[in-house]
Every structure is written in structure tokens, then in C-alpha cells.
Image: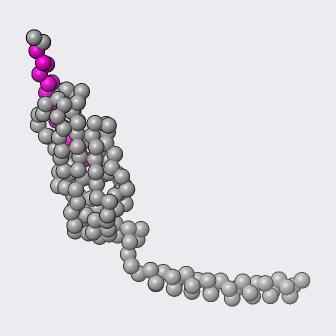
Amino acid sequence: MKKVFLLSLLAVSLWLPACENKQSGNQAESATPDASTPGVAPVMTFKEQEVNLGKMTEGDTLRHQFQFTNTGNAPLLIQSAVASCGCTVPSYPKEAVAPGKEGVIDVVFNSKNKAGFNTKTVTVYANTKPDMNTVSFKVEVLPKAEAKVQ
């Protein structure tokens, strides 16, 4: 029984260093940094995060582009962009934005039944740290002049 135990212990002690060498070899092979590497991450920097778009007439649509730059050191991938209201529809680049390159979040606002002061927010989910990035706009929607009954 002692011999079986000693042989098992010897086999395990020879096997463990072999596993450690394999693991360190794999780490050396993956020298290409990506967003999961500590200190390497994309950063979404907007030219303007909040904007006042002035006044518009109820029923009109308005388009605004939020420009951003990837100021990080890894490719920036946007997973989704979600508006705070169904009257606002965002679109975003589907391909990766390389470090130092620019992109645009395009936002279309439909002012139908939105008379008054409006503040709308778009939340952009990306592989940044943190993963949520927000932009917003304000607009005053002037009531449409009612048609006169003749």
C-alpha cells in the first residue's frame, strides 16, 4: 500500500511541473494584446455628450450626429445603442473602430405628440470600461398651429 501511495505521489509531482510549463507556453503565444488584457481597452470619447438642439415644430423629425473617437488602445466594438424613448432612434457603426479613429452615433427624433421641452438620452453599450456610454440632447418642440375651421 505504501508503494502504491509513493508511486502516485511521484507521478503527480512529475506531472504538475509539466502542466505549468504548458500554461506559461500558452501565455507567451498570446502576446497580442486585446481588450481583455489589463491596461488595454478602448475608450469612447465624444466630441459633445450633451447638446441643446434649440426649437422645432411638432410633427417634424430632427437628426443629430454624436461624433466620437476611440482614444483607447484596443478596437472599440459597439454592441447596441438604446434610446430613452421610442420617438428617438439611434444607429451606430457595426464594424470595429480602431484606436485613434472616429465614429458616429446617428440619432433621429420624431417630435409627433412631443410638444414642450424634451430631453432624450441614448445609452451606447460597448467593450469599454465601463460598458455604458451616454449622450443626450435637449429640444423645445413648439405646438403645431391648429388648422382653422372654415
Left or right: where does residue 44 sit relative to residue 34?
left
Across and down, in percent, residue 79 comes to: 37, 56
Instruction: Name the quadrant containing residue 14.
Output: bottom right
**Magenta segment, prevailing SS (helix, strand or loop):** strand
Q: Nearer the viewer, residue 88 or 44?
A: 88
At 25% across and 63% down in the image, what residue appears?
A: 70
Display coloring: one colour
State whether residue 34 is above or below residue 63: below
Across and down, in percent, residue 50 comes to: 19, 45
Q: Residue furthest right?
A: 1
Whether residue 56 appears in magenta in the rendering, the answer is no
Left or right: where does residue 107 sit relative to residue 12?
left
At 10% across and 11% down in the image, what residue appears?
A: 150
The N terminus - image quarter: bottom right
Across and down, in percent, residue 19 comes to: 61, 83
Q: Nearer the viewer, residue 128 or 140?
A: 140
At 17% across and 34% down in the image, what residue appears?
A: 60
Q: Is residue 83 visible?
A: yes
Q: Nearer the viewer, residue 56 or 52?
A: 56
| Number of marks drawn | 0
State whether residue 107 is above or below residue 59: below
State whether residue 65 is above or below residue 74: above
Q: Residue furthest front?
A: 150
Q: Is residue 129 visible?
A: no
The segment highlighted magenta reads 134-148
Instruction: Name the quadrant containing residue 36.
Output: bottom left
Whether residue 146 appears in magenta in the rendering, the answer is yes
Across and down, in percent, residue 55 comes to: 11, 34
